Image (tube, rainbow, N blue to C red):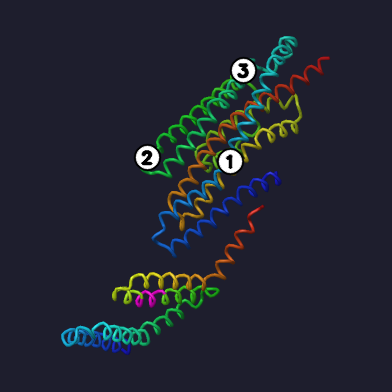
Amino acid sequence: MMPMLESVIGTVLSSFIIVIISTFMALLLDFLFPSFSRWTRTFLFFIVLTVVLYPAYEHLQMIRSITQTVATMFISVYPLLTASILASGGSFSMLNFQPAMLLFANGAVILSDKILIPMLSAALLFDIVSRFHPAIPFTRMSDLLRGSLIGLVSALVAAYSIFITAGGTISWALTGVTSEPIKKLISQNIPLVGSFMTDSLGAIGRYSSGASVFIGAWLIVTIWSVALLPTLKTLLTGFLYRWTAALIEPFANEDITGILDDIGKTLFVLCAVSFLVAFAFIYTALFTVILVKLITVVK
Amino acid sequence: MALLGILMVTLFQLVVIYLLLLIVSFASKSLQPIIYAAIFFFFLSYVGMTIIIPFGKTFLNLFEPLPGSYAKLLIGSVFLYYFSEMIVKHVAEAGYDSIAEVATLAIKIAILTLWLPQLSMLIETLSKFIIK
């Protein structure tokens, strides 16, 4: 956990420090040459854009490559899994597994690869254009894109959780009185995607606690952390964008803090998308592990 | 009470200077710029000595508890900028705008040079976070 934190904070924080220093530089230049301030603002905008866009773009790329990997995994594993379900017969009745669910997860991953991530890049582009040229604003467009993305993703996850609960698996061990305040805290403090995250976490949790009877708890923890690591990274980066915007607000131009805020918002949505992928990954991984265990036990 | 006396005297001087300048503009049009400049500098130095600089000192004492030399730097640079602005304005009024512009830039750079140690400290602290 710590090396991950350090690497994220290291790469992202240094670019934000560069933003802060260049803002100071622009401030001094404005003091010395007030008549040049319009151009100073433009050049500062360019500097900030080149420095700040890189981590966001890197995250988009990362989530995209993960999505593609998961999609290939699905395509290769799906026929195998269905075949072995058919072969093993009755032993799956106690697992309340629906093959349709797997297809569903596969579809979601392909959807996020083909539609969600390009839409997100378009939203980012619209934000930049409307900040750079306020006369032609596309803010509503990018908000619409982000809003519909969030709607799509949360609908998908809701469908997942309906599938899982319809199976009647054992409820999540954490959904007791103790976890309610934590869930409340998460859903209130992470902007845009907070409540969605707690809901879907509960859904995954419900499934994996049912599965933990068959596979060890440590394996579930491993699968969880592997799947959720990119999501956590993206979430942390999004928060760093918003923190920087809050930090430089007193002495920076409004459009620079605005662009940082916008990129942060987009990253939160990206975090939701990667959550969807992680969800699908966890489901498939758990299922594969259970299948392997069952086959070995039956033999 | 003393401050009120100084203020009254300054006001009276202002009226006298105004009348004097009016008379000069009647008596000799060609001598007026140089007399105006001389009276301006006299008046500026008088007001500076009796009001502005003493007030600056009390202002400094007021913000003594601030750490470091920030209060001194800030108040000093403000007064420096104000005096330079006064003189630059006077030069510009005489019709030498471009000279005034250059002088303003020079004063601004001088003020920035005063702040340079603090600024470099700040940038050094910030750049420690940059991982190359």
Name the amino acid, label 3.
Leu
Task: Name the residue located 65 percent from the left edge and 31 percent from the top edge.
Answer: A66
Q: Quarter of the image for the C terminus of chain A: give it.
A: top right
Which residue matches tag 2? A136
Q: For the residues marked 1 and 3, what is the alpha-carbon distance in whole angstroms?
A: 28 Å
- Lower position in the chain sequence, tag 1 or tag 3: 3
Pointer 2 chain: A
Residue placed most toward the observer, B60 or A139 = A139
Task: Name the residue located 66 percent from the left edge and 53 percent from the top edge.
Answer: B131
Task: Name the residue located 57 percent from the left edge and 64 percent from the top edge.
Answer: B122
| Both marks 3 and 2 on one chain | yes
Which residue matches tag 3? A103
Q: For the residues marked 2 and 1, what is the alpha-carbon distance in whole angstroms?
A: 30 Å
Residue A3, numbered label: none
Give the percent coordinates (x, y) of residue A11. 63, 48
Determine crowd level at label 1: few under 14, some 14-19, many 20+ residues with C-alpha closer than 10 A: many
Pointer 1 chain: A
Side (left or right) of B8 relative to A180: left
Segment colored magenta: B81-87
Give the percent coordinates (x, y) of residue A207. 65, 26
- Residue B109 in view, yes or no: yes
Residue A235, numbered label: 1
Q: Which residue lies furthest to the right in this view?
A: A299
- Lower position in the chain sequence, tag 2 or tag 1: 2
- Lower position in the chain sequence, tag 3 or tag 2: 3
Q: Quarter of the image for the N terminus of chain A: give it.
A: top right
